[in-house]
Amino acid sequence: MERTLVILKPCTIERGLIGEIISRFEKKGLKLAGMKMTWLTDELLSEHYAHLKEKSFFQRVKDAMRVCPVIVCCWEGLDAVEVVRAMAGKTNGRLAAPGTIRGDYSMSVQENIVHASDSLETAEIELKRFFKEEEIFDYTPSYIWSLYANDEI
Ligand code: UDP
Ligand code: MG
């Protein structure tokens, strides 16, 4: 099973969409392995968005993540990284396909509802960045065999 990081961005908290977005991942069949509300620091965001550090909008993107606390989640499932990225949709909410989270709830590139890890390698690094080891939980939901065939997991 893979684990991936999702951050509900400040726009999501402010617009009252927390339940709506979490509900999508739950309904898909992903398992919540960790979740907390936290106020991010500029230092942590500089690390998290290091791939954007040469961009003119680097500071703007970081500041947008500090408008209010965010909710960080760890979702678990088979191919969870790819599944969650597909559910998030394209970065630009205006171009993201209807049916995706960004496609359904965002009109912006920056204010695009969620962060989602883009590879398994990134997910491992990002989960360590936002969670302590004891904040990620191992458990097996009783409905696991309604989600997967026994040769899938
Ligand atoms: N972003 C932006 N303008 C851009 C590119 C990115 O405001 O031209 C923001 C946007 O919020 C995006 C985040 O920076 O989600 C991280 O960018 P990345 O390219 O990693 O996109 P993502 O992986 O979130 O789709
Ligand atoms: Mg990214």
Image (cartoon, helix red, strand yellow):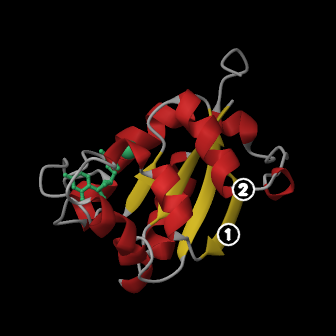
Q: Residues within 10 Å of mark 1 (few under 14, many from 20)?
A: some
Q: Amino acid at mark 1?
A: Lys
* Residue 22 seen in this snapshot: no
Q: Residues within 10 Å of mark 2 (few under 14, many from 20)?
A: some
| The N terminus: image quadrant | top right
Residue 80: x and y in percent read: 55, 36
* 113 lies above or below 27: below
Tell me which label, 2 or 1, sits earlier in the chain: 1
* Residue 99 seen in this snapshot: yes
Residue 134: x and y in percent read: 87, 55
Q: Is mark 2 within 8 Å of ligand 2?
A: no
Residue that label 2 marks? 131
For the residue labelled by badge 2, is the local secondary structure a helix, a strand or a loop?
A: loop
Residue that label 1 marks? 36
Q: Is mark 1 within 8 Å of ligand 1?
A: no
Count of numbered tags: 2
* 142 lies above or below 36: above
| Residue farthest to the front, as pictured | 54
